[in-house]
């Protein structure tokens, strides 16, 4: 199967999937070429312990453009980098090894059965600590005439 990626659609779908796994008090927004991460004011200690967690971002379009390999390789690579960026943001904000309990599990990704699978934990979905809902590769291509409202 040939993999075609409209990066704007990828950004929107990643924002949706990550919003489903991020802890309460955190927000993920699609913003042009990137995903923006933010945290509820005063809820988390933050890196400096002042309870003022600033926003951060994951530069999805830039990652997709600079990663080597096929489109499929770059898609998986972008997904893993985004998971890593989100993990760093949440862990620094909370002072906990999110989404693990004693250590940070490794961000992972793969294409399987026509879908992009992203998770934290062991390779090939083994011992997954936390996983996103998969993204169908057919949802990543450019919008087709007559396919209104799909994201």
Image (cartoon, rainbow, N blue to C red):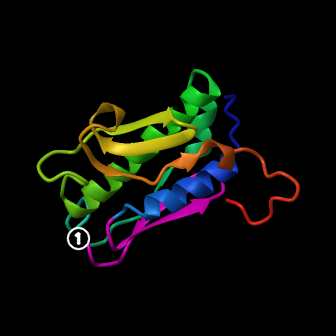
Image quarter for residue 71? top right
In this view, 18 is above or below 110: below
Image quarter for residue 126? top left
Q: Position of residue 137 (x, y in %)?
A: 62, 42
The answer to whether any part of residue 33 appears in the image is no
In this view, 108 is above or below 98: above
Image quarter for residue 149? bottom right
Q: Is residue 123 magenta?
A: no
Residue tagged 1:
50
Which residue sits at x=26%, y=56%?
Answer: 92
Which residue sits at x=67%, y=52%?
Answer: 9
Q: Residue furthest front?
A: 113
Question: Would residue 93 be found to the left or right of residue 141 on screen?
Answer: left
Q: Quadrant of the N terminus?
A: top right
Question: Would residue 52 be found to the left or right of residue 140 on screen?
Answer: left
Task: Count the numbered circles shown.
Answer: 1
Depth order, front residue of 25/126: 126
Which residue sits at x=31%, y=71%?
Answer: 52
Q: Position of residue 31 (x, y in %)?
A: 61, 60
The answer to whether any part of residue 125 appears in the image is yes
Q: Position of residue 86 (x, y in %)?
A: 39, 52
Q: Position of residue 130 (x, y in %)?
A: 31, 52
Q: Quadrant of the C terminus?
A: bottom right
Magenta part of the chain: 23-44
Which residue sits at x=68%, y=51%?
Answer: 8
């Amino acid at each position: 199967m040939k993999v075609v990626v409209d990066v704007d659609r990828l950004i929107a779908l990643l924002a949706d999937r990550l919003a489903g796994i991020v802890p309460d008090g955190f927000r993920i927004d699609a913003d042009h070429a990137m995903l923006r991460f933010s945290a509820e004011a005063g809820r988390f200690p933050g890196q400096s312990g002042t309870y003022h967690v600033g926003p951060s971002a994951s530069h999805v379009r830039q990652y997709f453009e600079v990663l080597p390999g096929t489109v499929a390789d770059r898609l998986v690579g972008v997904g893993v980098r985004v998971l890593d960026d989100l993990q760093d943001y949440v862990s620094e904000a909370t002072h906990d090894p999110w989404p693990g309990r004693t250590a940070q599990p490794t961000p992972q990704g793969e294409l399987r059965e026509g879908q992009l699978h992203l998770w934290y934990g062991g390779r090939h979905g083994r011992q997954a600590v936390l996983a996103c809902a998969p993204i169908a590769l057919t949802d990543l291509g450019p919008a087709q005439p007559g396919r209104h409202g799909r994201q």
